[in-house]
Amino acid sequence: MESLLTIRDVAATLRLSQRAVWSMLSSGRFGPEVIRLGRSVRIRSGELSDWVLAGCPNRVDWQAQRGEAVP
């Protein structure tokens, strides 16, 4: 089973502040899908790794690369 990362974990992995990750999320610059569990926000570790390897494209480009429907 793939692990789910908190925003704190994502920030540590990317070597950014939590505030920077939240800013990327709200502006659409963060590609991986957000999983909401109540008020908690989680990111799949595998998707984060794939996103970084793809060069950290914005959300719309990332969804297009993965063949997902773009809203």
Image: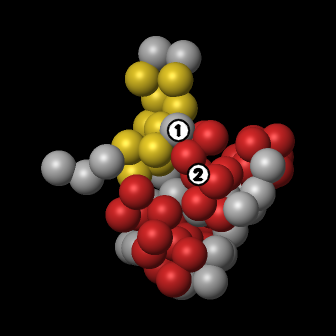
Which kind of residue does numbered mark 1 sit on?
Thr
Is 15 left, or right, of 7 in this rendering?
Answer: right
Rate crowding at label 2 as few (under 14), some (14 to 19) or many (20 or more) other CA atoms within 10 Å: many
Residue type at tag 2? Val
Residue beneath the point at 17% across and 50% down: 1
- Residue 45 lies, with reference to residue 5, above or below; the image says below
Q: Position of residue 33 (x, y in %)?
A: 49, 51
The answer to whether residue 34 shows anywhere in this view is no
In the rendering, at what x and y percent does residue 24 appear?
Answer: 76, 53
Q: Is residue 60 visible?
A: yes
Q: Is residue 9 left or right of residue 45?
A: right
Say which element carries label 2. helix
Q: Which mark is residue 22?
A: none
Give how far apart the Cα atoms at labels 1 and 2 are. Answer: 6 Å
Q: Secondary structure at mark 1?
A: loop
- 38 is higher (above) or lower (below) than 9: above
Residue at (67%, 51%) from the top-left corner?
A: 11
Look at the numbered discs 1 and 2 and tell me whether their residues touch, using CB distance below 8 Å: yes
* Residue at the spot 56% in from the left edge and 46% down from the top edge: 9
| Image location (x, y in percent) of residue 16 | 76, 57
Q: Nearer the viewer, residue 20 or 32?
A: 20
- Residue placed under numbered mark 2 in the picture: 10
Q: Nearer the viewer, residue 60 or 47?
A: 47
Q: Which residue is mark 1?
A: 6
Residue displayed at 25% across by 52% down? 2
